[in-house]
Image: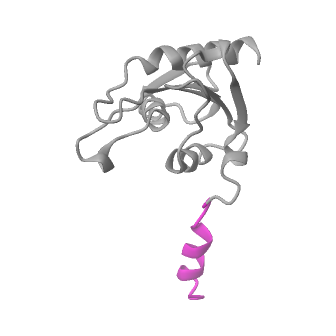
Amino acid sequence: MNERHRQLVEAACEQRLRSYSPYSRFRVGAALLGRSGTIYLGTNVENASFGLSICAERAAVCRAIADGEQAFEAIAICADGSEPTPPCGACRQVLLEFGGDLVVLMAGNRGAAGPVNTSTAGELLPLAFIDFSANLADERDGKR
């Protein structure tokens, strides 16, 4: 793991401590590295209506997009528990929206001092839903 990725993992672990997770008590932090070099942080925010909860990864992406960044190099995810926790399916789909080569670093509560798994968004979701524009073109051209 290079130094920049180590810093990203540590930022995610620090952000994890800001989680609002009164129901599961499972804290997750994310640190998303934009191509500009800016790091965008996110944490999971739970809600009594569980479907309204948001994951740390998507919170970081939303923050980046709101700040005008749309190109990313890597995301680090740090969760409670000693073993690395991969992103959920919804987060995998959202991350893949920004490129299959996006590096995904997954750490447990010991951060870079513990095990860190590395993958890409494309590897984590190999049969992803990527583009429906061909369907729209077919419909427009009367092929459907």
Q: Position of residue 10 (x, y in %)?
A: 58, 13
71 or 84: which is nearer to us? 84
In front of the other: 131 or 21? 21
Relative image position of residue 119 (x, y in whole percent): 72, 37
Quadrant occupied by the C terminus: bottom right
Relative to 95, does residue 32 appear above or below in the rendering? above
Outermost residue toward the right in this view: 1
Q: Which residue is depicted at the point 58% across and 23% down?
A: 82
- Residue occupying the point 42% across, 34% down: 59
Percent coordinates x, y for residue 131 in the rendering = 61, 62
State the image quarter where residue 46 is shown.
top left
List the single residue furthest toward the front. Answer: 82
Residue 140 place in picture, x, y as percent: 53, 80
**Which quarter shows the N terminus?**
top right
Q: Residue at x 54, y 15 (%)?
A: 11
The foreground one among 78 and 83 is: 83
> Does the magenta portion include 135?
yes
Q: Which residues are magenta?
A: 129-144
Decide: is 27 above or below 5: below
